[in-house]
Image (cartoon, grey):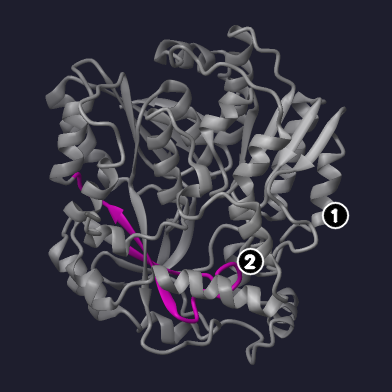
C-alpha cells in the first residue's frame, strides 16, 4: 500500500538547496548516495530525451517541472512548523546518537563537513513555492509584493516561531516566478520536534554546532515576520537590482521585457539573506536548551556562503593524507549538484560552488592556483535555463578544467546545451560513477571533533570562517 504524502512533503520544494542538502546528509548517514539528486532517476536516456527538444521547449519543461512543486495558497496556510520539522527529522536514522549536531544555514561545504564528522544537519530555512492564480510578468516586482500577503499572514499567525522571506529574483529565477512565489520559511524558535530530535541525538557533553552565515540583503517588511527580497546570490549585486543601469537594461532587452529596470520600493533595512542567511534569533533558544542538556555550543560564523568551501576542501586533503590516500583530484560541485558519499568513495577533494556565476568561478580558480596543480579536475554546473547576468560561459569553465595536469572533465554537463541543460540532473550520477574511476574504502570511522578543532587551530590566520564558543 502506497504511503500517503504528508502536507510538508507536498509543500516543501525538492529541487532546492536545503532539501537536497538535507537528503544528501541523511543518505550519507544511512550509508547511501543521493542518486538522482532525490528527485529524478539517474539515466543517460532521460538526459538525452529532455535535452532533445529545441531551447524554447526545454524552457517549458523546466517551467512545468517547477510548477508541479508549487502549492496552492490555502495549503501553506495550513502548514505548521511541526509538519516541517517532522519532514526533516524523518529523513535521519532513528535511535542513533552523535557527538554533534549541526543546525542553521545551508551550504554544500557544510554538508561535506557533516559527512566527515558523521553528524546530521537541521536546516533553519526551507523553501515553499506558492502557486499563482494567473501568470505574472517576472519584472513586475511591485505586483508580486502584494500577491501573497493573506496566506503569509495566516501561516505566520499559526506559527509564531517562524518567519517568511518572500523572495523574487527576476534574473536567476525569471522562468519560475511567472507562476509562483518563493517563500523561504525560517525558524526563529526551536519547535517541539526539532527539540526532541536534539535531545535524543545528543548525549550530555555533546556539541551543538550552529552554522551562521551572515550574508545579508536589503529587504522590505510586508508584515510581522514577513519580508520581501528582490534578487539573490549570483552575478548581480543588490545595488544592481535596486538602481538598474546599462547592464540591467541590456539584460531586460535581451529577455524581451517591456521594462528597462525594476521598480523596487526602497528597502527598510539589510537582513539575513533569504536562502543562505542565518536569523540570529534562533540562537537564544539553542543556548537555553544546550545549558539545560549539558551540551557545549560552538558557532561556525562566516560572511559569505562560499567562505567555507576552501576550508572544507583543505580539511579533506588533510584527512585523506592521514588515511593514507594521496589525492590530487578535485571535484567542483555546483549549488544542489553534490554528493558527499561519492566524493569520499572516489577520494575526491570537494570544492562546493554557490552558483554558476563569475564569483564562483573565481573562487575555484583561486583555490586551484593556491593548492594545485591537481592531477584531475572535475566540474559540474547547475543549469537553470536562463542566460543570467554574470553567468560564466562554458568556454571559461572549460579553461578551468585545462588547469588539470592529467585529466579535466565536466560531470553531467552537456556543453552544447548549457545553461539550458536539463539533462544534467539525470546525467550527474552516471557521469560521477563512470568518469572518475578511482575507488577507495569509505572511512572506518568519522573524523573526530577534536581532530576538526586541531585543524582549525592550525588555521588561525584564516579569518573568513570563525569557530566561536557559545
Give the residue pinned by disc 1. Answer: 395
Looking at the image, residue 400 sits to the left or right of residue 209; the answer is: right
Q: Residues within 10 Å of mark 2 (few under 14, many from 20)?
A: some
Residue extending farthest bottom: 258
SS for callout 1: helix
* Nearest to viewer (mark 1 / mark 2): 2
> Measured from the top left, where is residue 70 in percent x and y?
38, 71
* Side of 389 relative to 122 (left or right): right
Residue that appears at 29% across and 45% down:
88
Any mark on residue 92, and which? none
Q: Which residues are magenta?
A: 164-190
* Outermost residue to the front: 1
* Marking on residue 50: 2
Image quarter hosting the N terminus? bottom left
Q: Quadrant of the C terminus?
A: top left
Instruction: Identify the image quadrant of residue 75.
Output: bottom left
Q: Quadrant of residue 318?
A: top right
Q: Give how far apart the Cα atoms at labels 1 and 2 are.
A: 23 Å
Which quadrant holds residue 50? bottom right
Front residue (pair 327, 255): 327
> Is residue 174 at all visible to an observer of this figure?
no
Q: Residue at x 55, y 69 (%)?
A: 173
Which element carries disc 2, helix, strand or loop? helix
Residue 300 place in picture, x, y as percent: 43, 31
Observer-nearest of 437 and 151: 437
**Residue 76: image location, x then y, percent:** 25, 69
Question: In the image, is residue 126 above or below residue 316?
Answer: below
Image coordinates for residue 316, horizontal then vertical, percent:
59, 21
44 versus 121 height, above or below: below
Q: Mark 1 and 2 residues: CB-CB less than 8 Å, in contact?
A: no
Instruction: Identify the mark nearer the N-term, 1 or 2.
Output: 2
Amino acid at each position: 500500500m502506497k504511503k500517503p504524502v504528508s502536507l510538508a512533503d507536498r509543500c516543501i520544494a525538492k529541487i532546492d538547496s536545503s532539501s537536497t542538502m538535507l537528503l544528501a546528509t541523511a543518505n550519507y548517514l544511512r550509508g547511501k548516495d543521493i542518486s538522482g539528486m532525490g528527485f529524478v532517476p539517474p539515466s543517460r536516456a532521460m538526459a538525452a530525451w529532455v535535452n532533445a527538444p529545441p531551447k524554447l521547449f526545454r524552457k517549458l519543461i523546466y517551467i512545468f517541472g517547477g510548477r508541479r512543486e508549487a502549492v496552492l495558497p490555502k495549503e501553506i496556510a495550513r502548514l505548521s512548523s511541526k509538519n516541517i520539522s517532522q519532514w526533516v527529522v524523518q529523513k535521519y536514522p532513528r535511535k542513533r546518537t552523535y557527538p554533534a549536531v549541526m543546525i542553521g544555514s545551508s551550504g554544500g561545504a557544510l554538508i561535506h563537513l557533516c559527512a566527515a564528522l558523521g553528524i546530521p544537519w537541521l536546516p533553519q530555512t526551507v523553501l515553499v513555492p506558492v502557486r499563482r492564480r494567473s501568470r505574472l510578468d517576472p519584472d513586475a516586482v511591485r505586483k508580486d509584493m502584494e500577491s501573497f500577503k493573506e496566506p503569509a499572514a495566516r501561516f505566520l499567525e499559526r506559527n509564531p516561531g517562524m518567519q517568511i522571506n518572500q523572495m523574487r529574483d527576476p534574473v536567476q529565477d525569471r522562468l519560475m516566478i511567472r507562476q509562483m512565489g518563493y517563500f523561504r520559511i525560517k525558524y526563529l524558535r526551536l519547535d517541539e520536534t526539532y527539540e526532541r530530535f536534539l535531545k535524543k541525538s545528543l548525549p550530555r557533553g555533546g556539541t551543538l554546532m550552529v552554522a551562521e552565515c551572515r550574508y545579508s540583503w536589503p529587504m522590505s517588511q510586508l508584515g510581522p515576520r514577513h519580508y520581501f527580497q528582490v534578487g539573490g546570490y549570483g552575478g548581480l549585486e543588490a545595488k544592481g537590482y535596486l538602481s538598474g543601469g546599462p547592464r540591467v537594461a541590456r539584460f531586460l532587452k535581451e529577455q524581451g521585457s517591456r521594462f528597462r529596470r525594476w521598480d523596487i520600493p526602497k528597502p527598510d533595512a539589510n537582513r539575513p539573506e533569504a536562502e543562505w542567511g542565518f536569523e540570529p534569533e534562533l540562537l537564544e533558544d539553542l543556548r537555553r536548551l544546550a545549558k539545560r542538556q549539558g551540551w557545549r555550543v560552538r558557532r561556525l560564523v562566516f560572511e559569505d556562503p562560499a567562505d567555507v568551501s576552501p576550508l572544507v576542501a583543505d580539511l579533506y586533503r588533510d584527512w585523506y593524507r592521514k588515511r593514507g590516500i594521496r589525492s590530487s583530484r578535485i571535484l567542483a560541485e555546483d549549488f544542489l549538484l553534490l554528493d558527499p558519499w561519492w566524493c569520499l568513495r572516489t577520494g575526491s577533494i570537494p570544492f562546493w560552488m554557490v552558483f554558476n556565476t563569475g564569483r564562483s568561478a573565481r573562487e575555484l580558480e583561486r583555490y586551484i592556483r593556491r593548492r594545485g596543480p591537481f592531477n584531475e579536475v572535475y566540474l559540474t554546473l547547475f543549469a537553470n535555463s536562463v542566460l543570467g547576468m554574470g553567468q560564466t560561459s562554458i568556454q571559461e569553465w572549460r579553461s578551468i578544467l585545462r588547469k588539470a595536469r592529467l585529466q579535466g572533465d565536466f560531470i553531467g554537463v552537456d556543453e552544447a546545451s548549457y545553461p539550458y541543460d536539463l539533462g544534467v540532473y539525470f546525467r550527474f550520477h552516471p557521469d560521477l560513477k563512470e568518469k572518475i574511476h578511482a575507488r577507495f574504502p569509505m572511512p572506518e570511522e568519522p573524523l573526530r571533533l577534536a581532530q576538526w578543532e586541531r585543524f582549525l587551530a592550525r588555521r588561525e590566520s584564516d579569518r573568513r570562517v570563525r569557530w566561536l564558543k557559545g
